[in-house]
Image (tube, rainbow, N blue to C red):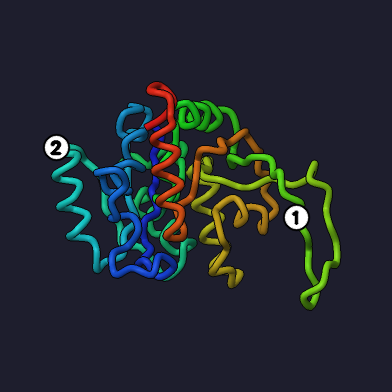
Amino acid sequence: MANAASILAGGTGQRMQSDLPKQFMDLRGEPLISRTLRPFMNSGAFSTLAVAIHPDWHEHLAELLDRHWPGQSIHLVPGGLTRQASSHHVLEHFARLPNPPRGVLIHDAARCLLSPQLLHRCVRALMQTRAFTCAIETTDTIAILAEGRLAQVPSRETLRRIQTPQGFDFRTILSAHRQALERGLTNVSDDAQLLLHLGVTVQVIPGDSMNLKISHPGDFALAEFLLNHQSPAGGP
């Protein structure tokens, strides 16, 4: 029972204000999704790798993977209307395999600067804990608002910025998704938060400030800058 990895790439480009979903947009001569996949493909740590993709873009992704990763077995799974649904679809796909995985890493396709070092740290954590998420400290002051006014300013010591990958015992996260639907939880923002809703303890491991999430057009320029100033051994 080896480990599996799930890449969630079900978006259709609305926030990027583009007809082309961001996972297919070019980042320094390479589609973003290809950069996201590379550390997983190179790690050798996963027996199964699956990508959740909107059905309208299934063929486009299949052709792209055939060009960039010829001969590699990457499962394509229909994405859902929400991130939660896409993640659930992949987990159910894994459950139908002859040998379901022991553990699973879940990663957002939009985080295309995942370093091999952080991925290795996640694989180690996957062997040691039932559920974890990557997170980094915040240098900004974060405020809670009420009707447009400051209501509370929590101490930064208690705050973290959540990242993916997130890792889970496979049976635990699959059961959590099924329970969430039974309870009417359908649009939880990530898998770790879903477990939190159901009372499961989620450990936190150090993330990486370079592990940028591409969400808006300006993020591509920042990603290009980071890639241009990255040390040769420091990342993808």
- How far apart, in angstroms, are the residues tagged by discs 1 and 2? 47 Å
Q: Which mark is residue 142?
A: 1
Q: Is residue 76 left or right of residue 135?
A: left
Q: Is residue 131 visible?
A: no
Q: Is residue 196 visible?
A: yes
Dot 2, how many residues are within 10 Å of its Cα: few (below 14), some (14-19), or many (20+)?
Answer: few
Horizontal and vertical percent position of residue 100: 37, 42
Dot 1, how many residues are within 10 Å of its Cα: few (below 14), some (14-19), or many (20+)?
Answer: few
Q: Residue at x 46, y 41 (%)?
A: 105
Q: Is residue 174 left or right of residue 162?
A: left
Horizontal and vertical percent position of residue 28: 30, 43
From the image, which quarter does the C terminus lie in? top left
User: Mark 1 or mark 2: which is in front?
Assistant: 1
Q: Secondary structure at mark 2?
A: loop
Q: Residue at x 45, y 41 (%)?
A: 104
Q: In the rendered picture of this protein, how many numbered marks are placed on residues?
A: 2
What's the residue type where badge 1 is placed? Ile
Q: Quadrant of residue 92?
A: bottom left
Q: Secondary structure at mark 1?
A: loop
Q: Which residue is mark 2?
A: 71
Horizontal and vertical percent position of residue 154: 83, 53
Q: Residue at x 36, y 48 (%)?
A: 94
